[in-house]
Image (cartoon, rainbow, N blue to C red):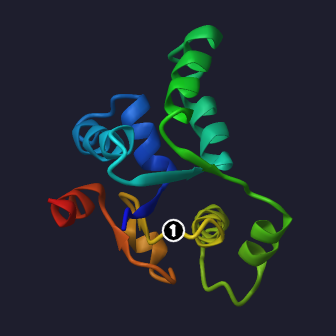
Amino acid sequence: MKQKVFADTNVMVDLLAHRVPFYEAAMRLFSLADRGECTIVVSALSFSTTAYLLERKLNYEDLSLVLRQFASIVEIASVDERTVRKSLSATSGFRDIEDAMQHYAALQTGCDAIVTRNIKDFTQADIPVYTPDEFLAKEV
């Protein structure tokens, strides 16, 4: 069965901004999705955050092209009212609302795991959490 994996915003930015030393692992991770070996999900929230971070480096046309190309290899999870309400719940256990939103978006799309560079931010997660390197080592 093909795994469905949720990629946190930091991993998406690592790839699209070519952030050293994280780019290599991000590229290998998203290459799995490009080859159809797994499904990678990112939240709609990640697209807006990434666009905000990259708009200083790329003009609108280039940024739009990069994001369209990226969108062609991933599944995009909605961040809807249900996601927001769960994230804001006192019982979520998360200390960061954005991380909670990512977590609930992952759950709502049926992901098997979350891949992030900030594992400590997801100690309350209901599914396994890996760094990109850990996930890639597991997949070999």
> In this view of the protein, which residue sits in the foreground, 2 or 62?
2
- Secondary structure under the numbered disc 1 in the rendered image: loop
Mark 1 closeness class: few <14, some 14–19, many ≥20 residues within 10 Å:
many
Give the quarter of the image for residue 21. top left
Q: Position of 92 compared to 106: left or right?
A: right
Picture residue at 82% right of the left edge, 73% below the top = 85
Residue farthest to the front, as pictured: 1
Give the quarter of the image for residue 102. bottom right
Residue 55: percent from left, percent from top: 59, 21
Picture residue at 53% right of the left edge, 32% below the top = 72
Picture residue at 63% right of the left edge, 70% below the top = 100
Residue 27: percent from left, percent from top: 29, 37
Residue 123: percent from left, percent from top: 45, 81
- Residue 77, compared with residue 57, is above or below; it is below
Picture residue at 29% right of the left edge, 55% below the top = 132
Count of numbered circles on the image: 1
Residue farthest to the right, as pictured: 81
Give the quarter of the image for residue 92. bottom right
The amino acid on which the numbered mark 1 sits, given as a three-letter code, is: Cys
Quarter of the image where the C terminus is located? bottom left
Q: Position of 30 compared to 8: left or right?
A: left
Q: Name the residue under label 1.
A: 111
> In this view of the protein, which residue sits in the foreground, 112 or 55?
112
Residue farthest to the bottom, as pictured: 91
> In this view of the protein, which residue sits in the foreground, 105 or 20?
105
Residue 93: percent from left, percent from top: 61, 86
Q: Position of 3 compared to 21: left or right?
A: right
- Residue 100, compared with residue 139, is above or below; it is below
> In this view of the protein, which residue sits in the foreground, 111 or 22?
111
